[in-house]
Amino acid sequence: MEGTELAGKILSTWLTLVLGLILLPSAFGVSLGISEIYMKILVKTLEGSHRITLFNQPQWATIRIEKGVPKESVKNSASVGIIQRDESPMEKGLSGLRGRDFELSDVFYFSKKGLEAIVEDEVTQRFSSEELVSWNLLTRTNINFQYISLRLTMVWVLGVIVRYCVLLPLRVTLAFIGISLLVMGTTLVGQLPDSSLKSWLSELVHLTCCRICVRSLSGTIHYHNKQYRPQKGGICVANHTSPIDVFILTTDGCYAMVGQVQGGLMGIIQRAIVKACPHVWFERSEMKDRHLVTKRLKEHIADRKKLPILIFPEGTCINNTSVMMFKKGSFEIGGTIHPVAIKYNPQFGDAFWNSSKYNMVSYLLRVMTSWAIVCDVWYLPPMTREEGEDAAQFANRVKSAIAVQGGLTELPWDGGLKRGKVKDAFREEQQKNYSKMIVGNGSLNSESN
């Protein structure tokens, strides 16, 4: 009996602390300064671990970490890698081979380029976690540094205890409360007749619950250029790194979501929130009907009272080092496009969801046991389709703006390569460009490895 009473007291004390110090402040969008103190301690800890790493690394690794990677290389490569690439165009490399007789050593240049493409191609690296230059006490990085020092190992052990025994229970509690309130709140609001009051309550519920969910990830978000926040009747497009992108954006404003009808927990959430807000959910068979999707989206943006639609044109999660091809369908609808650039800081936690490697539960566990989710969000000036510009050109213009603002590499590749194969037509186009370079009567028309 005494054990039951003790457990009850511990639980009530825990919930009281969570409610008073975290839940209520996050619901009202205010901070008591606890997260700021936590971030300062975290930054000091990671800086200390970085110095220990530099002191104990072998000479080659120390030099690499101290020098880092030139900004130009970071922009053109997904990771620091083991290959020091020559970033000059292939045409320049081939120019030295022309104008003289063929020599057997000439094949070395092509062999080098081929091996570089196989070992570190610019596409598949975007579908794996970004490599860090120094250890953040969460992972040994992609290069997998082994034992460094006893002191650093002790710091790591202490970090594991804090993350799994203190932060994880707290974050799971907040996430459970946030999702439960979202389902219950939107279900209740959905019973009201359509009115301005219902819209106001719906936005209040969405904002409040998303703030709680972001706080459950120890989220620290910096919003820039708020004067360009997406307006009702428009379309918000952003680069896509993780499912939590939705919560990151909804913490600062509400959106109408577009997506496929899901089952399980996601299905319960979808059915609840669509009662309070006109989100656009499609059945699997409807998603294949391009004209039907376009029609429903056009009907949505035609109503200036409805929330802006949130779309991720890449169609899949990319590791936040680059922006890949934007599907042109989102830009055929018409209306005003509100671009948004999202850039996560990988030093505090890896927000990228590698769906081919981790299921949703495993991914959420990784995120909730990281130090924090820190990111910057830039709202860009609204953009409209210019006269004589087709949807693909408009999509590329918006993509370029997002890439420049977020400091991301702009790539022409389709994110569908994450699970599919390169189309034969695209492969043949690259072969033609390559043959033109060889004979010297053409140039590379599109970016190619």
Image: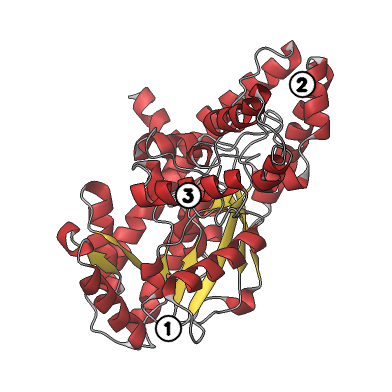
What's the amino acid at mark 1? Answer: Gly
- Residues marked 1 and 3 touching at CB (< 8 Å): no
Q: Quadrant of the C terminus?
A: top right
Q: Residue at x 52, y 28 (%)?
A: 165
Circle 3: element type: helix
Q: Which residue is mark 2?
A: 61
Q: Residue at x 72, y 14 (%)?
A: 148
Q: Which of the two discs, 1 and 2, labels the residue nearer the N terminus?
A: 2
Say what secondary structure mark 1 lies in: loop
Horizontally, is 179 left or right of 213 in the view?
Answer: left
The residue where tag 3 is placed is 432
Give the CA separation, mark 1 to mark 2.
51 Å
Along the viewing direction, whichever of 114 and 407 lies nearer the viewer: 114
Given residues 132 and 371, the one toward you in this image is 132
Whole-percent x, y for residue 345 in the image: 64, 46
Mark 3 surroundings: few (<14), some (14-19) or many (≥20) residues within 10 A: some
* Rendered location of residue 250, percent (x, y): 47, 65
Residue 317 visible somewhere in the drawing: yes
- Give amino acid for label 2: Ala
What separation in Å lies between label 2 and label 3 (alpha carbons)?
Answer: 41 Å
Which numbered disc, 2 or 3, marks the residue closer to the eye? 3
The amino acid beneath tag 3 is: Lys
- Decide which of 220, 412 is in the foreground and name it: 412
Residue that numbered label 1 is attached to: 335
- Residue farthest to the front, as pictured: 101
Q: Quadrant of residue 58?
A: top right
Separation of disc 1 and disc 3 at Cα? 38 Å
Q: Earlier in the sequence, mark 2 or mark 3?
A: 2
Q: Residue at x 66, y 73 (%)?
A: 225
Q: Which mark is residue 192?
A: none
> Which residue, as the protein is rendered here, is positioned at the far left?
285
